[in-house]
Image (cartoon, rainbow, N blue to C red):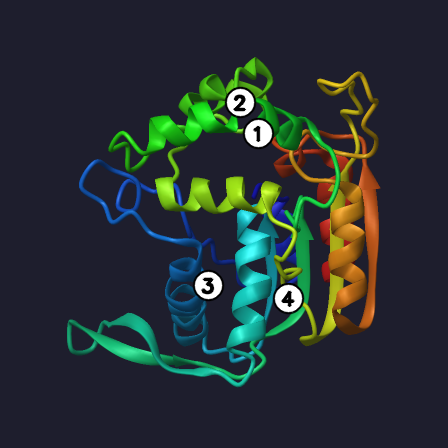
Amino acid sequence: MVIKIKNLINDGRSLWEIEIIGSPTTECSTCPDYTYNDLVDYYWPALVAGVEKYSGQNIIDYVGHSGGCRVALDSLKNWSAGKNNAGYYFDTTTGTYVLTDLASSPVDTFIGVACPGIFNGTSRFTDQVNTYGNDLIRYLDGGINHPTQTEVGLRLRANFFEKRVLGDDRISSNLMNYYLNLVNSTSDTIPGKTFSINKLFLIAGDKYPFKDSTGQTGIDDDGFVLVSDVNQIFNSITKNIGNVTIVGAHHGEQVSDKQVQKSIIEDLK
């Protein structure tokens, strides 16, 4: 997630970047084929607990893009009361790694950009999954643990996804299968449903209305996430302050879109 770091630092903020997925230590041929629940119950709590320890703050503001938004919402719901021994931090005094806890209600202001919901509608992604999803599933079942997202796009016959929406970052097969199942499931739970937070701001893109394989025109999606899903997430979470902002950018563009950056800065203030 790219934001105007200098502006925030000038406001006296301490900024920390966490890498939930996509790093060389999580995406490699010998790396664990982690699941969505692994991210929710282990990765995210450990990373945020580390930020709390290093920064000396028990309450933080959080900005997450795509899966970094969805995972965070479900993790906050599961661990709203905190989590003991959530992860390790490096103690510079002893030179060792020490377990630390995740505080209860650790996030005050939550900003989610392009946050996937339960795919309750038609987007370019859902249309391609419904048409070519079985080809991708067969490819993943062939022993590919961490395909590039370009490889995913190729199996979905969607050049649109290869570079512009997904890119070349890798993703675990289990996580990819999780999203494929979301498209076809009618029983999934809205991320973060029923949990409470002080401030909630969500940003969604509507750049790519399109005609699906039946000739029906889709509306209000960023190529991957539907605006209707983002609104559904927003309405399912209790908050004191918040809103949904719609921008004219596709899924990948939103990490650097000027309107998105402006909204993030304003919401954090």
The N terminus - image quarter: top right
Tell me which amino acid carries mark 4.
Answer: Gly
Q: Residue 62: which numbered mark, if any?
A: none
Tell me which amino acid carries mark 3.
Answer: Val
Q: Nearer the viewer, mark 4 or mark 1?
A: 1
CA separation in Å, label 3 and label 1: 24 Å
Q: Is residue 6 above or below residue 130?
A: below
Q: Nearer the viewer, residue 9 or 106?
A: 106
Instruction: Check disc 2 and report the residue beneath it.
Output: 132
| Residue 195 image position (x, y, % from top left) | 67, 75
| Res 143 quadrant in image | top left
Instruction: Check disc 4 and report the residue beneath it.
Output: 192
Instruction: Check disc 1 and report the residue beneath it.
Output: 129
The C terminus - image quarter: bottom right
Instruction: Check disc 3 and report the residue beneath it.
Output: 40
Q: Is tag 2's residue or tag 4's residue first in the polypeptide sequence?
A: 2
Q: Is tag 4's residue or tag 1's residue first in the polypeptide sequence?
A: 1
CA separation in Å, label 2 and label 3: 28 Å
Q: Is residue 232 left or right of residue 34?
A: right
| Residue 154 image position (x, y, % from top left) | 46, 17
Marks 1/2 in contact by CB < 8 Å: the verdict is yes
At a point 43% along the width and 27% down the height, the residue shown is: 136
CA separation in Å, label 4 and label 1: 24 Å
CA separation in Å, label 3 and label 4: 11 Å
Label 3: how many Cα within 10 Å (few below 14, some 14–19, many 20+)? many
Mark 1 element type: helix
Q: Is residue 192 above or below residue 202?
A: below
| Residue 252 image position (x, y, % from top left) | 61, 31
At a point 76% along the width and 34% down the height, the residue shown is: 221
Q: Is residue 85 left or right of residue 9?
A: left
Tell me which amino acid carries mark 2.
Answer: Tyr
